Amino acid sequence: MAAVGDWVLLSYRLPREPSAPRVTVWRKLRRLGAVQLVDGLVALPASSQNRERFDWLADEVVEAGGEAWTFDAVPGSKEQQRALAARLTDAAAEDYRALLDEAEALLVSPERLQRRSVDRLRRELRRIEDRDPFPPKERAKVRRAIERLSARVDAADEAVAR
């Protein structure tokens, strides 16, 4: 990761029709955890990986008949830097809360609990962590819930093996 104040930006514009490329780009940006600054301008903390991700997306936008550019940027003030970091953290916290809700639903419904459910939750947790440079408190809560689920699955597996 680059210095805390460095960001990579993707500026893009896609035709309204067909809508499929717009939806695809939006979903990929969501998966990356990009912060939308204004319509068609998104940001991620600067890193070679995030630059590469935005370059790939820019290529997809151009192939779909749109326009796209990537830029490196440093916010003009510490307040702007804090605001960007807070937006990134808030988005990750929302994703962690959704994952926590899933884990808690499995904790209260042990009949639905299976190893593959725990494995899927772990994969989703890793995906969120991979794009989360400013971890919110929700991250630790999700980790604990998934570990409780894993312990329950292990105990159930042991009981069946006996």
Image: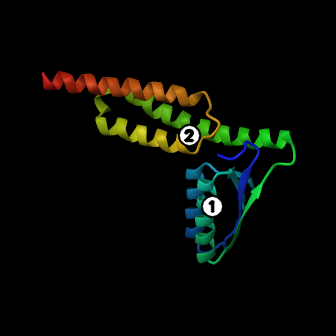
Above or below: residue 40 compared with residue 147? below
Local SS, label 1: helix
Local SS, label 2: helix
Q: Position of residue 94 (x, y in %)?
A: 60, 38
At horizontal 42% and vertical 42% (from top left) the residue drawn is 123
Q: Can residue 46 be seen by looking at this rendering?
A: yes
Question: Mark 2 vs mark 1: which is more N-terminal?
Answer: 1
- Camera-side residue: 158 or 100? 158
Q: Position of residue 126 (x, y in %)?
A: 48, 41
Tell me, for residue 66, which label it has, or none: none
- The kind of residue tagged 2 is Asp
Q: Label 1 belongs to which residue?
A: 54
Label 2: few (<14), some (14–19) or many (≥20) C-alpha neighbours in 10 Å: some
Above or below: residue 33 compared with residue 154? below
Q: Can residue 108 be seen by looking at this rendering?
A: no
Tell me, for residue 95, which label it has, or none: 2
Q: How many marks?
A: 2
Disc number lying in front (2 or 1): 1
- The kind of residue tagged 1 is Phe
Quarter of the picture containing the C terminus is top left
Q: How is the image coloured?
A: rainbow
At horizontal 60% and vertical 61% (from top left) the residue drawn is 52
Q: Is 18 left or right of 75, judged from the image as shown?
A: left
Q: Mark 2 near mark 1, Cβ–Cβ under 8 Å?
A: no
In three-dimensional space, the C-alpha distance between marks 2 and 1, rounded to whole angstroms, equals 21 Å
At horizontal 72% and vertical 58% (from top left) the residue drawn is 9
At horizontal 58% and vertical 54% (from top left) the residue drawn is 49
Q: Position of residue 8 (x, y in %)?
A: 70, 55
Label 1: few (<14), some (14–19) or many (≥20) C-alpha neighbours in 10 Å: many
Q: Position of residue 86 (x, y in %)?
A: 72, 38
